[in-house]
């Protein structure tokens, strides 16, 4: 189902390429199916190397626990900001 919807979205958006990332992109069967369907539909496919396909949710949750235990908490006005400078403190 994911592959069919991905290809349909590419067609609807008039895209020449498709891609998946994150933990789901480590699924070898899915990678093979998407590669095969992309070739059938004349779409380029971009897949990250398996070494970059980890699901980091458990690691992030674990780190959050230890930060909380250490008293490191952000203020309530913290919001997601994809372009935030990584060098800036999140606690200020």
Image: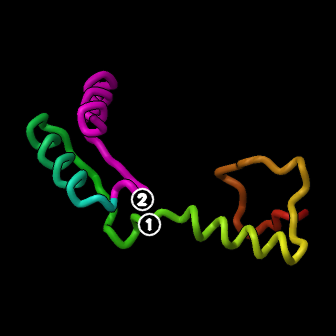
Question: Left or right of 81: which side holds 78?
Answer: right
Residue at 87% in and 64% down = 73
Say which quadrant the N terminus sits in: top left
Mark 1: few/some/many CA within 10 Å (<14, 14-19, 20+): few
Say which quadrant the C terminus sits in: bottom right
Residue 17 on the magenta segment: yes
Residue at 18% in and 39% down = 43
Range shown magenta: 1-25
The percent coordinates of residue 41 (x first, y second) are: 13, 34
Q: Residue 7, which numbered label?
A: none
Count of marks, rendered view: 2
Q: Quadrant of residue 40?
A: top left
Q: Quadrant of residue 84?
A: bottom right
Q: Residue 54, which numbered label?
A: 1
Residue 20 on the magenta segment: yes
Work out whether mark 2 precedes mark 1 in sequence or the reverse, and give the earlier one.
2
The percent coordinates of residue 75 (x first, y second) are: 91, 55
Labels 2 & 1 near each other (Cβ < 8 A): yes
The percent coordinates of residue 38 (x first, y second) are: 17, 42
Tell me: residue 48, above or below residue 5: below
Q: Residue 23, which numbered label?
A: 2
- Secondary structure at numbered mark 2: helix
The Cα–Cα distance between marks 2 and 1, rounded to whole angstroms, is 5 Å
Residue at 84% in and 75% down = 69
Question: Left or right of 74: which side holds 46?
Answer: left
- Front residue (pair 84, 30): 30
- Secondary structure at numbered mark 1: loop
Residue at 78% in and 47% down = 79
């Amino acid at each position: 189902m994911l592959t069919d919807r991905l290809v349909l979205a590419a067609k609807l958006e008039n895209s020449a390429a498709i891609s998946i990332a994150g933990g789901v992109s480590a699924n070898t069967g899915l990678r093979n199916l998407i590669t095969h369907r992309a070739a059938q539909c004349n779409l380029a496919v971009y897949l990250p190397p398996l070494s970059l396909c980890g699901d980091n949710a458990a690691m992030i949750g674990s780190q959050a626990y230890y930060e909380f235990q250490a008293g490191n908490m952000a203020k309530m006005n913290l919001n997601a900001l994809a372009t935030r400078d990584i060098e800036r403190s999140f606690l200020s």
